[in-house]
Amino acid sequence: MRRRYERLSRFPEGLLVTGDALCNFNPIYGQGMAVGALDALAMRDCLRAGATALARRYFAAAARAVDPAWRLAAGADLAMREAEGSRPPRVRVLNAYVRRLQRAAAHDPAVAVAFGRVTGLLDPPSALMRPAVLWRALRG
Ligand SMILES: Cc1cc2nc3c(=O)[nH]c(=O)nc-3n(C[C@H](O)[C@H](O)[C@H](O)COP(=O)(O)OP(=O)(O)OC[C@H]3O[C@@H](n4cnc5c(N)ncnc54)[C@H](O)[C@@H]3O)c2cc1C
């Protein structure tokens, strides 16, 4: 569940929202604390720049921190038949690719590392589209 505070035009002064209150994930992905830490870094950087328009700056920065994990987790949830939500072609193709990637990762350490780095939020999801990973996943 994601709350899009960055889309609000007004927000009370002296209050910020972080961690699970901003976005909470299906626990099977193990991303909640990592994203909470990224929110904290975004908050630190925004506070260093002063208090002017703090909420607007912070929520925009936090949204950028949350986005990759949210896309991964929400997209992966849609691979489950019982999950409600629309599945545009982009999501269906991506989930089919991730299934191949996971099969390849079971016996190809390079693919496993690439996948782990993305789910661990060390690399952006686009890292899984690098030619070397793509080739190994499709071949595997
Ligand atoms: C089963 C499970 C497994 C998970 N596994 C992982 C994992 O492997 N890796 C990972 O990164 N994340 C994991 N998570 C997610 C992670 O636990 C959360 O993302 C993280 O705890 C969120 O921290 P938070 O401080 O935002 O919220 P919370 O940890 O929920 O802290 C909120 C605190 O506020 C308190 N509170 C609530 N209301 C009030 C009130 N009115 N007044 C005062 N206090 C109040 C609560 O008691 C609580 O202590 C998992 C979550 C679950 C449920």
Image (cartoon, rainbow, N blue to C red):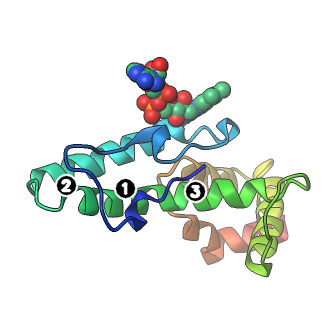
The residue that appears at 75% across and 71% down in the rendered structure is 91
- Which numbered marker is on residue 46? 2
Asked if residue 126 lies left or right of residue 18, the reply is: right
Type of the residue with mark 1:
Ala
**What residue is disc 1 on?**
62
Percent across and percent down for residue 130 are 60, 74
Percent across and percent down for residue 55 are 25, 56
Looking at the image, is 130 positioned above or below residue 18? below
Locate the C terminus by quadrant. Answer: bottom right
The residue that appears at 74% across and 56% down in the rendered structure is 76
10 Å crowding of disc 2: few (<14), some (14-19), many (20+): many
- Which numbered marker is on residue 26? none
Judged from this view, the residue extending furthest toward the left is: 50
Mark positioned earlier in the residue sequence (2 or 3): 2
Mark positioned earlier in the residue sequence (3 or 1): 1
> Quick one: 14 or 44, which is closer to the camera?
14
> Quick one: 7 or 111, which is closer to the camera?
7
